[in-house]
Each structure stands twice: as C-alpha cells, then as structure tokens.
Image (cartoon, grey):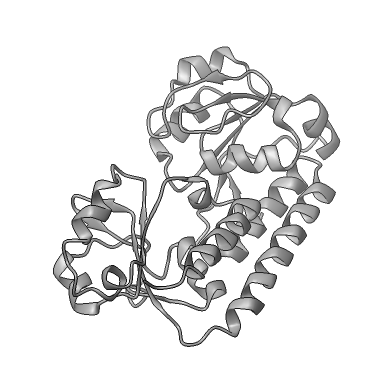
C-alpha cells in the first residue's frame, strides 16, 4: 500500500466513495488530523487526541497521543481509526485489533516528499484524490518559489535547531524538519547525524558556532532558552542577533500545507538583517 500500512485491512467491499461520505474517523495523531482537515473532511472526524487541532465540527477528545482511551474510542463506534508510526504505540494498535476495530497506520515521514506521499495515499483511501492532489500541488509551488529565491542567497548559513532543552535535542538528517534546510539553502548544524532527533551538548553547539539558531517551543522548551543562549556572545548567531524563538508548533506537524507555511516563515526570519 505504499507509505500507508494497514494493521487491519479495510474491507474490500467498501469503496472510496463510501469512506468519504459515510465514515466516522478517529485520528490518533496531530499530523493525521490536520491532513484530514486539509482534505476537506473535518465533519467525518469524530475523535481526536488532546494534541490535535480541533477543527470546526464538534469532536470527542479520546486521550493523548501516547495513551488514547480505547474504551472511549470503542464507544464512538468508528469505521476507521488512523494512527501514525511516529508517536503512537504498537501495543495500542494490537489492543484495538483484538477489539475488532479497523486501524490504519501512516508511516513516519522523513522528508517533504514522504509528507506529500502520505497525503496523496490518504486522499486515495478516503475518496479525496483530487483534493489531495490540489493540496500537494499548492504546497510544492509555494516551496519551489522559496527555493528559487533562496538559491540566490550569498553563502549557506549554518542553522541550529533546538527541539528539546533538558537534555538538549536537535534534528538530524532523518527528520522531515531537515528538509527545511534543503529548500532554504541553509546547512543543518547537525545534519551529519543520521538519526531523526539526536541528543547533543551545549559545548558541541558552541564549537560548531551556528550562524542562525531556531529554538522551537516544544518538549518543554520556553523563551528562557533564548536568554540562556544569549549568555554566549561568541556564538555568531548571538553576536548578530539571529537567535529566534518559534512559538507556533504548526510548522512541525508534517502536512504539505504546514510544511509550505513553515518554509515561508523561516525564509522571513532568515531575511532579517544581522545586527
């Protein structure tokens, strides 16, 4: 099935049109929930986790990303439960399988192309092929415009991405977030590490001396981190006032339109003149 893998195969007699029009869906991950909204089927989503965007139609909160309330899920009588390999637990899938629920698991996206592939396959399953194709095409156009503008930028600035502070975590080459560097014509300070989210030391950040620092409000990271980094005036990013605290987490929920918006937002920050 490509990048989407079924834990329980969807009954062959149910057509895509049936899923699109008469389905009660529960989403167990923010990226899945947002993707469903982007496909225009907000009203079909009857249950979400506390971490998911709420959308427009009323929905039942069925717990957290890591510990969904399976009893609540069963009571909602879903036709389909959609989960993600990134964040949801296999034990949860197994329990839902034993209860007879139909579950679909989306592969973790490690780059923008895989984000788009997930959206297209989800659209195919739910009878929203045209909507998915439109979303992906729009995102690709926006990102290509940024890429062309940034291609002409002088030099390739090194960027440090902070996604956890105690201990300190960043992004490696196997995170979809690394693709921001690809389209922005920047260099990920820790892009040489071939995992998604490596733990690193402050000493190593100081040694590598990034030109730009993006501090992301996730995993307990607060604006205090910017103040702490400003205590190191030898870092080029600090010296040139290019330490940015990013409050919105939307850019790190992997959907095509979120990624396009993030690419445009980081371009604006990179265009901020050094002090």
Say left or right for 160 vs 77: left
Q: Position of residue 171 (x, y in %)?
A: 36, 63
Q: Residue at x 19, y 75 (%)?
A: 234
> Which of the pair 16/38 is nearer the observer?
38
> Which of the pair 12/217 is nearer the observer?
217
Inspect this view and state whether residue 3 appears.
Answer: no
Which residue occupies the extreme front position in the image?
275
Which residue occupies the extreme top position in the image?
75
Q: Quadrant of the N terminus?
A: bottom right
Q: Position of residue 110 (x, y in %)?
A: 50, 62
Q: Residue at x 76, y 61 (%)?
A: 137
Q: Residue at x 72, y 26 (%)?
A: 44
Q: Position of residue 212 (x, y in %)?
A: 36, 70
Q: Position of residue 222 (x, y in %)?
A: 29, 44
Inspect this view and state whether residue 232 appears.
Answer: yes
Say left or right for 259 vs 160: right
| Placement of 75 over or under 253, stated as above or below | above
Say left or right for 27 vs 173: right
Query: How many circles with numbers are drawn on the protein?
Result: 0
Q: Quadrant of the C terminus?
A: bottom left
> Which of the pair 120/19 is nearer the observer?
120
> Which of the pair 140/127 is nearer the observer?
140
| Placement of 156 over or under 108, stated as above or below | below
Q: Quadrant of residue 100?
A: top right
């Amino acid at each position: 099935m490509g990048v989407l893998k079924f834990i329980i195969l969807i009954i062959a007699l149910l057509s895509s049109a049936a899923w699109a029009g008469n389905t009660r869906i529960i989403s167990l991950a923010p990226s899945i929930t947002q993707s469903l909204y982007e496909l225009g089927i907000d009203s079909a989503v009857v249950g979400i986790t506390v971490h998911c965007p709420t959308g427009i139609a009323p929905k039942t909160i069925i717990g957290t990303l890591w510990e969904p309330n399976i009893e609540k899920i069963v009571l909602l009588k879903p036709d389909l439960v959609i989960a993600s390999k990134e964040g949801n637990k296999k034990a949860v899938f197994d329990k839902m399988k034993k209860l007879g629920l139909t579950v679909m698991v989306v592969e973790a996206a490690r780059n923008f192309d895989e984000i788009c592939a997930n959206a297209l396959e989800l659209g195919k399953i739910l009878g929203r092929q045209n909507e998915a194709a439109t979303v992906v095409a729009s995102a690709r156009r926006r990102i290509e415009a940024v890429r062309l503008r940034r291609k002409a930028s002088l030099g390739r600035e090194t960027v440090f991405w902070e996604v956890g502070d105690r201990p300190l975590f960043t992004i490696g080459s196997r995170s979809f977030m690394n693709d921001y560097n690809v389209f922005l014509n920047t260099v990920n300070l820790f892009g040489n590490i071939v995992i998604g989210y490596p733990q690193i030391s402050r000493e190593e950040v100081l040694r590598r001396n990034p030109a730009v620092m993006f501090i992301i409000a996730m995993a307990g990271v607060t604006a205090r981190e910017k103040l702490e980094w400003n205590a190191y005036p030898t870092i080029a990013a600090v010296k040139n006032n290019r330490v940015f605290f990013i409050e919105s987490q939307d850019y790190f929920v992997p959907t095509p339109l979120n990624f396009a918006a993030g690419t445009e937002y980081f371009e604006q920050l990179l265009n901020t003149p050094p002090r």
